[in-house]
Amino acid sequence: MGHVMEHVALELQILAGMQCGFGRCTWDGEEGIYSVIFSYEEERAGFYAAEAAFEIVRTMLAGKSYDLEKDIQALREIREEERFGPSTASIVHEAQKRHIPVLRLNRYSLVQLGWGIYQQRIQATVTGRTSSIGLEIAFDKEETKNMLHNNGCPVPYGLVVYSADEVESAATRVGFPVVVKPVDGHHGQGATINVQTPEEAMVAFEEARKISSRVIVEKYIKGSDFRLLVINYKFVAAARRTPAHVTGNGRSSIQELIREVNRDPRRGYGHEKMLTEITVDDMTRRLLDLEGLSMGSVLPPGRVLYLKTTANLSTGGVSEDVTDTVHSYNVFLAERVARIIDVDVCGIDVIAPSLAEPVSENEGAIIEVNGAPGFRMHLSPTAGQPRNVAEPVLDMLFPLDHPGRIPIISVTGTNGKTTTTRLISHIMHLSGKKVGYTTTDGIYIQNRLLYKGDCSGPESARFVLRDPTVDYAVFETARGGMMRAGLGYDLSDVGVVTNVASDHLGLYGIHSLEQLTRLKSLVAENVHSRGYAVLNADDDYVYSMRENVLCNQAFFSMDALNPRIDEHCSAGGTAAVYENGSITLRKGEWSIQVDRVINIPLTYFGKAAFQIQNVLAASLAAFVQEVKVEEIRMGLQTFAPSSAQLPGRMNIFEFEKYRVLIDYAHNPSSMEAMGRFVSSLGPGCSTAILAGNGDRRDEDLQDYGRMAAEYFHRIIVWEDRDYARGRDSREVMELIRDGAANNPKNARVQVIPHEDDAVDHALQEAGPDCIICIFTGRIEAMTDKIKALKEKELDLSIAREDIPNIPPASL
């Protein structure tokens, strides 16, 4: 039934004019649970189709009838409300053809083309470069006419009126027939053409006044309605426009003639087809009243009846491309008008018998200048050659030397993502980049924290890409975000995979390490062909990703003699290895030492092996992005695992008697890494304070406790209710406790329900040279607590130093 639902959801959208073809129904390993996946053009339509498909299948299973038409019409309406109009869509499509990223900024037509500092914005056909003054002039018909007239451009004579008392006098002075329209209207709203009498003028005035308090009465110019399109002050296209109309046959009523016209397969609802269906609205009824007709009237054979006062395609008009017949004088005139009004994307409306001769010689005139002209008439004319008028818009916004993209490094893996992301960002910052990066801690723009929280998903990535100050992006890309909503970008420049280990299994249909590998491989696979996948050659799961990677590959390893590295470099490849206590970069036959690990604070004098892996990954990612080796070295030497630079990742606080370590280690593999590190610090007593997340499998929680007991002398388990995630938090605590208790090392295991109490207890019992390791998700709160204790100890130490050393005999 899930498979049936998939096809019903797709077909509903197709019937509503949206071309959607991809679909799958998969079993995710849990009995009775299926994942139904299908494509959509508009997200809201996709959700509607999913719910409707469910109802349709359920109704059919019950043997009942179902009204499909209501769903199809609802989807059509959603499509028209949500989708881009033809003009915006054409620009977006042209950008995508050029691999320029597109981000929709609202529900309407505000769109960002490009990323970061290279972005350009459009709103329909208005660009970020469009002059606001020019738009105001174009929107004001009186001001437009004055400027054009003062610059010698042909415009019809007209007068502006403010009250009904002025209408007849103005129309008489101008001379009938006249056109009556609002001064600051658009799309033909409130306009009436070919007004013949004072009575008609009064009716037309009332219609215009609904749109604007200022109404213009101007001379009616006979001829065809033409639109000349100028982009970047260069003429690009011209079209003859004809308003929606019907032609009488002596038999059919006007209503029947409209139905017949709408049967044309080229006409559809809204913008779904080349032409739009003709609808009867107030404008149509007003025109019929002026002609003394009704919808039931029968027109004599051959009589043409116009049903709209404007020739807009969106109201049922038709267009014919006449670009190739435009006289050179009219091209000159159009480009000059665009400069006079100062609008970079400009539609100039001309009434004239023809554009094949100069309008100055055939009594033609410029009627309007549009600052946000529609492209549909040029993209899909009813007759003549279609014109790709979006192309010159993209040429204007993105010249050949304008990239449109900022570099992206995306980092994923089970452990080490945050550290590697922060270290890469630090190196790039030192190399002069304005970096935006995301982590599980928050979103950072140029090292300023702008949003706090787990920001390792696609929406956080888009936050950075929208920022106009950023010229480099580094993303921590976690499993959950990818499963819920993808990557947040199309292609990166570097995809880093640190490792794959058991964590989060059993969620979102991921039940095995092979499935987790497939998911995380998306980061390595979605790199552009000239970019690099940076992979861990010591991890079999990560190394297997190379088989599906189409970009360049670079590998890192803790073993300088790793045969995988040797094979890769022998073929001219690039790698980073840990060799004789140093970070070494290799490319083909040559190698260069970046630095010794004892000089790299993150590695804690080389004792934190897992941090050396992160250093290798970050150094290699920076190197393939052509960062200088000395800049990489400087970045490594100035990046420390402090609460300021790397909160919650191996933060060590030195007290007089003991040390406190705060870390986010939350799965068995990260606990093993931390255990090995703590063991390398010396023989002193070690305590681990830990809790677990409720969305982990039972065996993972037990392994987490078991691994802690493998390396620590004492285990304190507490109950984390904040991360229970729908599960009994006490059960989670007991599973970790049981795992720790069953370890043969016989570590001392204790349960203290509250974290603060557990920490206080551990500190009170801490002896000399002890290390207390707090593994927590409450990084900020626990860091503040330990810092406060450290400051208190420091204050006491200062106070002791201030007491004078008085000899005992003098007391």
Image (spheres, rainbow, N blue to C red):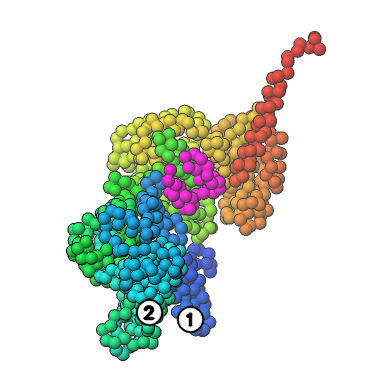
Amino acid type at image mark 2: Leu
The numbered mark at residue 67 is 1
The numbered mark at residue 167 is none
- Give the magenta range: 440-469
> Does residue 71 appear in the picture of this structure?
yes
Nearest the viewer among 502 and 721 is: 721
Q: Quadrant of the C terminus?
A: top right
Give how far across and how far down residue 774 sits, in percent: 62, 40
- Please name the residue shown 20% across and 58% down the image: 329
Badge 1 density bin: few <14, some 14–19, many ≥20, Cα 10 Å? few
Extreme residue in the bottom direction: 251
In this picture, residue 748 sits left or right of residue 31: right
- Please name the residue shown 66% across and 31% down the image: 791
Please tell me whether mark 1 sits on a helix, a strand or a loop: loop
Give how far across and how far down residue 65 sits, in percent: 50, 84
In this rendering, is residue 29 above or below 316? above
Extreme residue in the right direction: 811
Nearest the viewer among 89 and 60 is: 89
Amino acid type at image mark 1: Asp
